């Protein structure tokens, strides 16, 4: 990256790890949404963990899901604090599945190393609380664990990551969950 023409500074070399900043299904109750917002349906989440090989789970509120994706980032640090990442053009190849038995609220995800949930709120603190609560609910329900046991696991091992000013994700290493299967398939 070169600095803008009117500024002095060094060039940077930053590793690109592309991901879509925006992934969503149509929100419930025929809400009008813009591409800047986020909620239980997904939206402008800006989660750097949503890279190739990830499984992202979004609730479906309407027939056909009305899924949309965009806002490709070449990379982004922890938090899109200035309102932009390294924005890129490109193509994304996705596989969409419907899991009718899945009733959890809000975006969740699995990578080869992590299991996590994403929250959205009026600020990052609210979003982080929501993402951690969603993760605890998901793990305790899918593993049959006591909620307090799961809260301890999340408290001691969670990796928290801001997406932008209104979203945050909470994840735990999958190897702490016992068993090798992906929770998204259960």
Image (tube, helix red, strand yellow):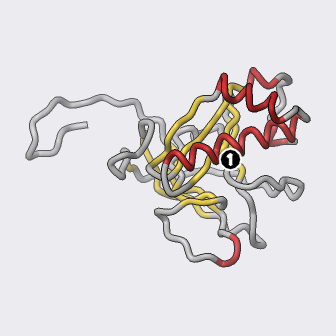
Q: Nearer the viewer, residue 53 or 123?
A: 123
Does residue 83 appear left or right of residue 63 in this picture?
A: left
Q: Nearer the viewer, residue 18 or 42?
A: 42
Can you identify the residue that label 1 sits on? 56
Q: Which quarter of the rendering shows the C terminus?
A: top right
Does residue 38 appear left or right of residue 84 in this picture?
A: right
The tally of labels here is 1
Q: Is residue 155 above or below residue 103?
A: above
Q: Position of residue 3 (x, y in %)?
A: 18, 39
Q: Which quarter of the rendering shows the N terminus?
A: top left
Residue, far front: 148
Q: Report the residue at 81% width, 28% height from top.
A: 149
Q: Position of residue 24 (x, y in %)?
A: 62, 60
Q: Is residue 88 above or below residue 48?
A: below
Q: Report the residue at 70% width, 71% height from top.
A: 28
Residue 61 position by quadrant: bottom right
Q: Nearer the viewer, residue 39 or 175?
A: 39
Q: Report the residue at 62% width, 37% height from top.
A: 170
Q: Can residue 151 be spotted in the picture?
A: yes
Q: Circle 1: is it few (<14), some (14-19), or many (20+) Cα within 10 Å?
A: some
Q: Position of residue 104 (x, y in %)?
A: 79, 53
Does residue 186 appear left or right of residue 108 in this picture?
A: right
Q: Position of residue 112 (x, y in %)?
A: 69, 29
Does residue 86 appear left or right of residue 98 in this picture?
A: left
Q: Report the residue at 70% width, 37% height from top.
A: 110
In what element is the residue under mark 1?
strand
Q: Can residue 113 be spotted in the picture?
A: no
């Amino acid at each position: 990256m070169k600095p803008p023409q009117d500024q002095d500074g060094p060039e940077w070399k930053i590793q690109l790890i592309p991901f879509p900043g925006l992934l969503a299904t149509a929100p419930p109750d025929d809400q009008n949404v813009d591409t800047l917002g986020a909620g239980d349906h997904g939206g402008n989440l800006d989660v750097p963990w949503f890279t190739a090989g990830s499984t992202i789970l979004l609730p479906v509120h309407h027939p056909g899901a009305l899924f949309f994706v965009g806002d490709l980032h070449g990379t982004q640090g922890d938090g899109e604090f200035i309102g932009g990442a390294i924005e890129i053009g490109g193509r994304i190849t996705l596989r969409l599945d419907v899991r009718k038995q899945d009733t959890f609220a809000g975006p969740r995800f699995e990578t080869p190393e992590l299991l996590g949930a994403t929250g959205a709120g009026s600020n990052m603190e609210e979003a982080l609380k929501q993402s951690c609560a969603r993760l605890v609910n998901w793990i305790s329900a899918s593993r049959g664990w006591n909620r307090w046991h799961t809260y301890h696991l999340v408290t001691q091992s969670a990796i928290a990551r801001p997406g932008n000013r209104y979203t945050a994700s909470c994840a735990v290493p999958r190897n702490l969950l016992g068993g090798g299967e992906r929770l998204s398939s259960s």
